[in-house]
Amino acid sequence: MKKPETDPVIARNRKAAHDYHLGESWEAGIVLQGPEVKALRAGRASLVGGFAQVENGEMWMHAVHIPQYSQARWFEGGSRRKRKLLLHRAQIDKIDRKVNEGGLTIVPVTLYFKDGRAKVEIALARGKKTWDKRQVLAEREATRETERALNRRLKGRPD
């Protein structure tokens, strides 16, 4: 039996879409230590609150929670340690330029395995204002209400 090309998604940062206007995105590899890979394979990770930065020409991901694998021996990593992201030099330079000139931030959006390697999708993001968030919620609620009314009408209920 052939193994699937990509494993399911380990973690999504749904809060990022709520808090930011997401722009251009890239796929990056992650430098992990042994027990962290096992914890990811067990499906345990959280991207909420995570961000990435360019430091000395290298991309680093901060505040992403990968818990300690319970069956591993003692591990000195820390669940929220910074982890190096693997990107091409041209990609890192392009991201750094856009962040410095546009007031953007780099947010991890999705964490997954691809061909047996851990990957993270990072995106350039611009923070939303409070009224933006309220407007999106109001639009979503309005579409729900119209769908409900349409369903009631189709079923023949006068409500």
Image (cartoon, rainbow, N blue to C red):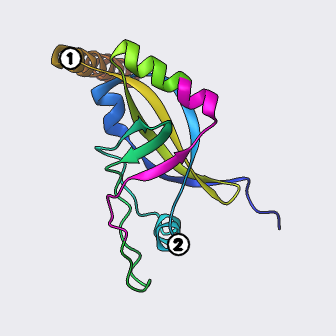
The relative height of residue 102 versus residue 117 in the rendered view (above or below) is above
Whether residue 159 can be seen here: no
Amino acid type, callout 1: Lys
Label 1 residue SS: loop
Give me the disc on residue 31. none
- The answer to whether residue 64 is left or right of residue 41 is left
Which callout, 1 or 2, points at the residue further toward the start of the chain?
A: 2
For the residues labelled 1 and 2, say whether their Cβ atoms are less than 8 Å apart.
Answer: no
Across and down, in percent, residue 138 comes to 22, 17
Whether residue 49 is in magenta: the answer is no
Across and down, in percent, residue 116 comes to 67, 60
Q: Residues within 10 Å of mark 1 (few under 14, many from 20)?
A: few
Amino acid type, callout 2: Gly
The region drawn magenta spans 77-93
The relative height of residue 11 versus residue 17 in the rendered view (above or below) is below
Label 2 residue SS: helix
| Residue indicated by mark 2 | 34
The one of 159 and 34 positioned closer to us in this rendering? 34
Q: Which residue is at 53% across, 56% downward?
A: 31
The one of 150 and 71 positioned closer to us in this rendering? 71
Whether residue 108 can be seen here: yes
The furthest residue to the left? 130
Q: Which residue is at 43% across, 40% downward?
A: 108
The one of 16 and 1 positioned closer to us in this rendering? 16
Q: Which residue is at 73% across, 53% downward?
A: 5
Q: Residues within 10 Å of mark 2 (few under 14, many from 20)?
A: few
The relative height of residue 151 versus residue 55 in the rendered view (above or below) is above
The relative height of residue 71 versus residue 150 in the rendered view (above or below) is below
Q: Quadrant of residue 90?
A: top right
Q: CA distance from mark 1 to mark 2?
A: 40 Å
| Residue indicated by mark 1 | 129
Q: Which quarter shows the N terminus?
A: bottom right
